[in-house]
């Protein structure tokens, strides 16, 4: 899927993974004046967060990864708040499958959940158009 929608992009940052930590970080960012795109593999979690805390700030509800990425202003900033290991790798793989005009998601594939004692085998600096944060 190619993402080339910038007119609907209004979120300054996005949070995917809306369990306890992800939802609280999203709320904190929104309370401090940021417009936050929300994504969770279960849309019910997104809707529950908005129903309970939608008045905390400005949120953008999304249902798919493509919609989530399209809602983000450039440079796109995403917090991945899912369990470490396979779940993190699965989310990164979803982002890597998205094609953007700048191919900014190329860095997702090299941004892996690494053992802190072992440096990445092939470190690749991120393109200047993307800021990547992986929280595990």
Image (spheres, rainbow, N blue to C red):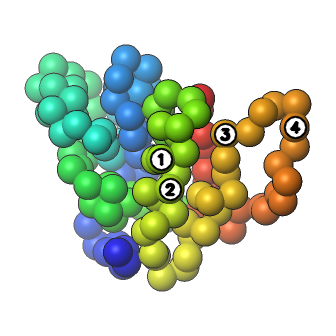
Pick whichever of labels 1 and 3 is earlier in the sequence. Answer: 1
Q: In front: 69, or 54?
A: 69
Q: Which residue is mark 3?
A: 113
Q: Which residue is mark 1?
A: 90
Q: Is residue 118 visible?
A: yes
Is 53 above or below relative to 68? above
State the image quarter where residue 4 is shown.
bottom left
Q: Secondary structure at mark 1?
A: helix
Pick whichever of labels 3 and 4 is earlier in the sequence. Answer: 3
Q: Are marks 4 and 1 in contact (CB under 8 Å)?
A: no
Q: Are marks 1 and 3 in contact (CB under 8 Å)?
A: no
User: Mark 2 and mark 3: span between their CA atoms?
Assistant: 12 Å
User: Mark 2 and mark 4: span between their CA atoms?
Assistant: 21 Å
Disc number placed over residue 75 in the picture, else none: none
User: Mark 4 and mark 1: span between their CA atoms?
Assistant: 21 Å
Is 106 above or below relative to 121? below
Give the residue drawn at x 74%, y 39%.
114
Query: Which quadrant of the rendered structure holds the C terminus?
Result: top right
Pick whichever of labels 4 and 1 is earlier in the sequence. Answer: 1
Give the residue drawn at x 61%, y 50%.
132
Pick whichever of labels 2 and 4 is earlier in the sequence. Answer: 2
Give the residue drawn at x 81%, y 31%.
116
Q: Are marks 1 and 2 in contact (CB under 8 Å)?
A: yes
Give the residue drawn at x 46%, y 47%.
91
Query: Horizontal placement of 103 versus 58: left or right?
Result: right
State the image quarter where residue 121 is shown.
bottom right
Q: Which residue is mark 2?
A: 93
Disc number placed over residue 118 in the picture, else none: 4
Q: In front: 89, or 13?
A: 89
């Amino acid at each position: 899927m190619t993402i080339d929608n910038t007119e609907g992009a209004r979120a300054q940052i996005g949070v995917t993974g809306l369990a306890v930590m992800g939802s609280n970080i999203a709320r904190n960012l929104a309370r401090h004046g940021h417009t936050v795109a929300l994504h969770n593999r279960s849309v019910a979690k997104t809707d529950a967060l908005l129903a309970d805390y939608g008045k905390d700030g400005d949120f953008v509800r999304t249902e798919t990864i493509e919609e989530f990425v399209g809602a983000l202003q450039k440079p796109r900033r995403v917090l991945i708040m899912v369990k470490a290991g396979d779940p993190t790798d699965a989310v990164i793989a979803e982002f890597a499958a998205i094609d953007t005009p700048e191919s900014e998601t190329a860095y997702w594939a090299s941004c892996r959940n690494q053992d802190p004692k072992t440096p990445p085998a092939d470190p690749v600096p991120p393109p200047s158009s993307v800021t990547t944060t992986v929280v595990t």
